[in-house]
Image (tube, rainbow, N blue to C red):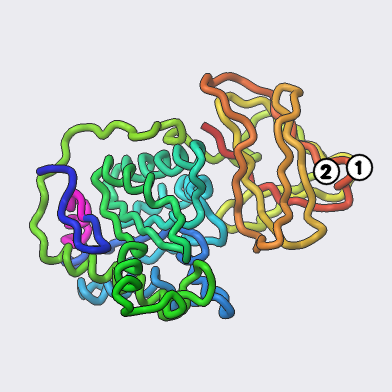
Amino acid sequence: MGVIGAIWEDVLMENNRRIKNAVAKALKGDTVTIAYLGGSVTAGYIPDVGITKESYAKMSFDFFCNKSKNHDCRYINLGMQGQDALAGLALTERYLRIEHPDIVFIEYALTNQMDNESILAFEGLIRKIYNFENSPVIVLLFIPNKEFITSESYMRKIGENYCLEMISVSEKIKNELSTGSIKWNDYSSDNGYPNKWGHIFITTCINDFFNRIWKEKYDQELKNEIKPYFGDYYTSYQNVNFESIRDIYMTGFKYADSNARFPYAVISTNQKQSIISFTIKLRSLFIIFEQSNDINCGEIQVYIDNNYTENVSGYCIYGRNNPTMKLVFKENITAFHDVKIVMRNDNRNRFITIIGIGMC
């Protein structure tokens, strides 16, 4: 069977074997794990309300459970404010790899940027999950903003390359707006975040997808290895906890289990010198840190082989102690490098929480 399936308005149906396997598993009464990766929308954020349990993620999960008459399904929501595919890589390595999800919804069209690194990170995330031993189904979910300027275009190309299921809420809303069936304010009270009805609208798109899958016959199995579309640089991404690094030197920082999803975080302790240094083999380095709206949150400087590379600031007016990642070093060749992380001299009375590092 060809790669491209039928298109029904908002749903692009690709090879359905993985999703049909998940449905069959649920109908047998076995536990099916459904995971959601994304930003604030996936977390359940509603303008002027905050995070709510009435999110599209929870409502679509409940629909699947009810339709399959299986209430032993497991729900994993890893949506967090401002998260992009880089953060998704860290969450996937820390959490999804050991949870063995059967279905993974990925919603990063609003938050993932359009630069080359963001594109490669997104494809790396797709390849990493796609190659899990239990062969989960990946469903790409495209949420719009008012201007309909998102990363959907390149994400569609990646999705088509891997024969993924894709749901474009953007296309569905465009159709509804063009016919006058709805106005933007019905869906959202600002430029992007759906309101309560907006979450119901997204849920309806997903539920429609589930209904169609229930009726479909199995596609033929894809046997050929799928080659990268843009690149596979980030497929080798892994998290590294500070405590696992041999011969690490640390002063002015202490271990603080501040983030349950990423244990072994360290926090600066307002000493004259706050330094972390170690030697490690890698070709790229990421700092994973908590982003806070506390004005006392400070900055670190990162040095590779005694050369200054980047500043990393823990402060953001929109921060909510959410895990954030920043790429601070990248090469094409893997080699040993000396890494030094230093609290800025003029920030010694401030604090920052470093969750760990990521590397390829």
In this rendered view, identify the residue nearer to me: 315 or 156.
156
Q: Label 1 neighbourhood size at 10 Å, few (<14), some (14-19), many (20+)? A: few
In this rendered view, identify the residue nearer to me: 152 or 128.
152
| Label of residue 272 in the image | 1
Q: Are marks 2 and 1 in contact (CB under 8 Å)?
A: yes
Q: Is residue 152 left or right of residue 322?
A: left
Quadrant assignment for the N terminus: top left
**Start-end of magenta stretch:** 13-24
Whole-percent x, y for residue 334 in the image: 53, 21
Q: CA distance from mark 2 to mark 1?
A: 8 Å
What residue lies at 45% left-to-right and 41% top-to-bottom? 119
| Label of residue 252 in the image | 2
Identity of the amino acid at label 2? Gly
What residue lies at 61% left-to-right and 51% top-to-bottom? 324
Q: Label 2 neighbourhood size at 10 Å, few (<14), some (14-19), many (20+)? A: some
Q: Is 23 in the magenta?
A: yes
Q: Is residue 283 left or right of residue 99?
A: right
| Label of residue 355 in the image | none
In this rendered view, identify the residue nearer to me: 287 or 39.
39
